[in-house]
Amino acid sequence: MASIMAKHVTHCLCIIIASFCLIVTASDPDILSDFIVPENTNASALDGSFFTFTGMRGIFRSPAPPNVKGTQASMVEFPALNGQSVSMAVLQFAPGGINPPHTRPHATGLLFVVEGSLEVGFVDTSNKLYTQTLQAGDMFIFPKSLIHYQYNADASKTAMAIAAFGSANGESVSIPATMFEDGIDDGILAKALKTDVATIQKIKAGLAPKA
Ligand SMILES: *[C@@H]1O[C@H](CO)[C@@H](O)[C@H](O)[C@H]1NC(C)=O
């Protein structure tokens, strides 16, 4: 009897610990202070400016970029976000602009289209693709760390979206850049993609910045 009870208790404990781990890893680590004061900063000299980010002033009037431009406000640009589990970015798309497949290993992304329209999609871990055409006013969620993209299919209109991230670290990892611009051997890439080295080199040449 006692051993059955002990088994039950152990089982429950395991479930509680497992759930706790899931909760903890679903967002940035919780902090034990109101906010994190950067090193070498006099905490008593902090004022409202520390909690203010002005780096996007004028962004809604700025001209369309050549393809796509992302302006990030994560903890690198805005140190007060450290420990607060949120960050943002503004994405501006030229007509036909594409934000190639990428992941954000640390952050769920909530995309809010404020101008134009966007074709978006992500692929889950069972390789299922989810796509949508978004209009201004629509939101779409990219689950944390899954590969996703956005494309402005309109050849004449610009598009703009605001992305909110569930982490102070909204860092993205571009799939084309990671695969073809970080020095992985051409022969390895050719084998992995079941093609030849010439094709890999052609892809690399297409991705290289134009002089
Ligand atoms: C920290 O800031 C407070 C308030 O501005 C000031 O009185 C104090 O002298 C500063 N301390 C140091 C070590 O700079």
Image: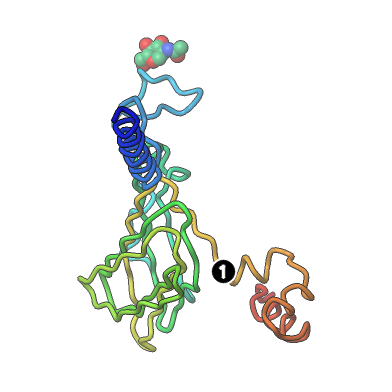
Of residues 145 and 75, the one nearer the viewer is 145
Say which element carries label 1. Answer: helix
Q: Does the beta carbon of the residue at mark 1 sit less than 8 Å from ligand 1?
A: no
* Location of mark 1 (residue): 175
Q: Residue 37 location in percent, x, y?
A: 41, 27
Q: Residue 180 location in percent, x, y?
A: 67, 71
Quick one: quadrant of the N terminus?
Answer: top left
Q: In the picture provided, is 205 more to the left or to the right than 95?
A: right
Of residues 9 and 201, the one nearer the viewer is 9
Q: Residue 142 location in percent, x, y?
A: 36, 65
**Residue under the image location 35 percent in, 54 percent down:** 165
Location of residue 63 (image quadrant): bottom left
Of residues 130 and 93, the one nearer the viewer is 130
Q: Amino acid at mark 1?
A: Ile
Quick one: quadrant of the C terminus?
Answer: bottom right
Mark 1, Cα crowd under 10 Å, few <14 / some 14-19 / many 20+, is: some
Of all residues shown, which one is farthest toward the left? 137
Of all residues shown, which one is farthest toward the front? 1
Q: In the picture provided, is 169 more to the left or to the right than 56?
A: right
